[in-house]
Amino acid sequence: MSNDGIENVGVIILAAGLGTRMKSDKAKVLHPILGRPMIDYVLSAACEVTDQDVVVVVGHQADLVREACLRVRSVNFALQQKQLGTGHAVLCAMPEVRDSVQHVIILCGDVPLLRPKTIQALLNDHILANRDLSLLAVALENPTGYGRVIMNADRKLSRIVEEADATDEQKKIKLINTGIYCVSRTFLSTSLNEIRPDNAQGEFYLTDIIEVGYRMRKHIGVLVGSDAGEVSGVNTVADLKAVESLMAGRGEKP
């Protein structure tokens, strides 16, 4: 898949976490789906959009994650020595993003059902709308556990509120953050330096760059995906089995 003439696009894949709810000492992205590490699927999808500017953020079992990635494609790596949140992970990756990259796609390494065409659609929408930041969101009947997408009175994206920080009213919102973004390189660099760990987890949330952009009157927006299943994250053994079943239904082979 080409990127329709759009050049200077990079991808950052967040793959540093252990995944404590997997009940395993293995790095989350190394858990197998149909015999392949979970990260394989995300990396393969990313490389169909851009095959030269991909940075994988590693942390837990960094060497093993690097080896798994390099079996798929030659990519660059950034080390997140301490897991201080998604915003911190992207900050660790930025020195590895080439200066020529103008737009950065941010993916999570635990969303293996994501299709290249969905990443491409987000990129195309971002470029055509000339945004500083674009977020992929989906609507869920049961949004428990996910960050909620907050709109202002004019139905414009203003911020993301994580479940742990959400009010009872905000928890009723069904539109959720998938953790998938396309951000202009300039705005990403600026906004990462503005976020603070002022939240229940004491972490640097990547989602806070949305509020920074809103405050700075940047052009930010949402693309609502049509397939919520495609952006399902793997957090538990049950999630892993469900994703493996869906993957097999697509015709994927070990």
Image: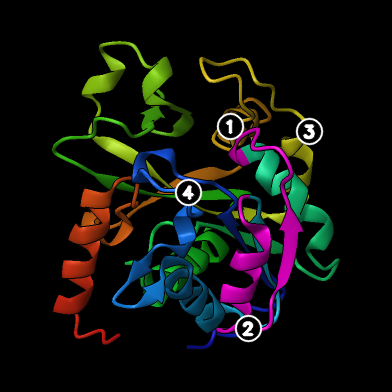
Identify the secondary structure beneath mark 1. Answer: loop
Instruction: Specify the amino acid type for callout 3.
Output: Asn
Taking the image as shown, residue 169 lies to the left or right of residue 19, namely left
Q: Is residue 62 magenta?
A: yes
- Whichever of labels 4 and 3 marks the residue nearer the N terminus, that label is 4
The local secondary structure at tag 4 comes to loop
Q: How dense is the environment of label 1, judged by Cα within 10 Å: few (below 14), some, or many (20 and up)?
A: many
Q: Which residues are magenta?
A: 60-86
- Residue beneath label 1, please? 205
* Local secondary structure at mark 2: loop
- Location of residue 101 by image quarter: bottom right
Q: Quadrant of the C terminus?
A: bottom left
Q: CA distance from mark 1 to mark 3?
A: 12 Å
| Residue that badge 4 annotates | 25
Amino acid type of disc 1? Tyr
- The residue where tag 2 is placed is 51
Residue at 72% from the left image edge and 47% from the top image edge: 80
Q: CA distance from mark 3 to mark 2?
A: 28 Å
Instruction: Name the image colouring.
Output: rainbow
**Residue 107 image position (x, y, % from top left):** 52, 58
**Badge 4 or badge 2: first in the primary sequence:** 4
The label shown at residue 193 is: 3
